[in-house]
């Protein structure tokens, strides 16, 4: 059975941990979260949903029982993240924080599931400490043949050297 690719746009004023489960869909998880620091999150969400329909041409999925609009779209989460980030950057850039490190992009929470290609993993906690700038980012580049560049220090190192250090 093919399960359609869909995503939900939603807000919470209680933190990501309050939205991390859905009893009606055990496969549900938070893909990406943006921390809105300033502004009315209810108004921002309404404008975002309108933007996705009017400017991006997306169609909201209807609730089966009532046929009213839901906050869900048949769209890949990865593509939706780009649209949401563009919206925030365009209309509410002063409401979020930006990285001051390597890439300078918008700060976000990114699920560990996303980083592991949606493989099933043991449960992982999500709480206030999980939601911080660059929580899943690694600032190094694989230069090949086991050589890596650490962007925060500018140092080059071999992965084997790092593994040997852990033995001591």
Image (cartoon, rainbow, N blue to C red):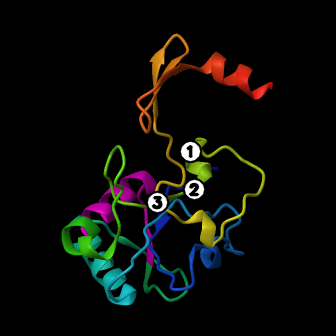
Q: How far apart are marks 1 and 2 (CA)?
A: 7 Å
In x, y percent, where is residue 154?
Answer: 40, 30
Q: Mark 2 points at which residue?
A: 111
Circle 1: element type: helix
Residue 83, given in percent of the width and then of the height, sits at 30, 61
Taking the spot 33% from the left edge, 65% from the top edge, the residue there is 84
124 left or right, relative to 76: right
Report the mark closest to the observer, 2 or 3: 3
Of the numbered discs 2 and 3, the one sitting upstream in the chain is: 2
- Where is residue 50 shown, x and y percent of the image? 27, 79
Task: Decide: few, some or many residues near mark 3? Use Cα within 10 Å; few <14, some 14-19, many ≥20.
Answer: some
Q: Quick check: is 19 in the magenta stretch?
A: no
Q: Mark 1 points at which residue?
A: 115
Outermost residue toward the top in this view: 145
Residue 163 falls in which quadrant of the image? top right
Specify the label residue 28 is tagged with: none
Q: Please name whichever residue, 119 or 109, is drawn nearer the observer in this view of the structure.
A: 109
Span colored in magenta: 71-87
Question: Callout 1 environment at 10 Å: few (<14), some (14 to 19), or many (20+)?
Answer: few
Give me the residue at 50% from left, 41% from top. 138
Q: Are marks 1 and 2 in contact (CB under 8 Å)?
A: yes
Query: Which residue is under mark 3?
Result: 133
Q: Can you see residue 40?
A: yes
Which residue is drawn at the image coordinates 19% and 68% (left, top)?
Answer: 90
Using the image, determine if residue 135 lies above or below residue 37: above
Picture mark count: 3
Which is in the foreground here, disc 3 or disc 1?
3
Instruction: Choose top left, top right, bottom left or bottom right for residue 61.
Output: bottom left
Picture quadrant where residue 168 is located: top right
Does residue 83 belong to the magenta stretch?
A: yes
Asked whether 54 or 162 is in front, the reply is 162
């Amino acid at each position: 059975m093919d399960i359609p690719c869909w995503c939900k746009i939603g807000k919470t004023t209680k933190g990501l941990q309050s939205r991390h489960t859905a009893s009606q869909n055990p496969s549900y998880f938070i893909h990406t979260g943006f921390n809105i620091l300033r502004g009315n999150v209810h108004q921002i969400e309404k404008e975002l949903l309108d933007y996705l329909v009017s400017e991006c041409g997306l169609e909201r999925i209807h609730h089966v029982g009532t046929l009213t609009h839901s906050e869900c779209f048949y769209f890949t989460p990865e593509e939706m993240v780009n649209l949401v980030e563009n919206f925030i950057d365009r209309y509410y850039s002063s409401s979020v924080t930006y990285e001051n490190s390597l890439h300078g992009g918008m700060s976000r929470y990114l699920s560990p599931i996303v980083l592991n290609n949606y493989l099933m993993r043991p449960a992982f906690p999500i709480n206030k400490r999980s939601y911080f700038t660059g929580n899943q980012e690694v600032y190094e580049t694989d230069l090949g043949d086991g050589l890596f560049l650490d962007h925060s220090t500018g140092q080059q190192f071999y992965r084997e050297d790092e593994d040997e250090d852990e033995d001591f």
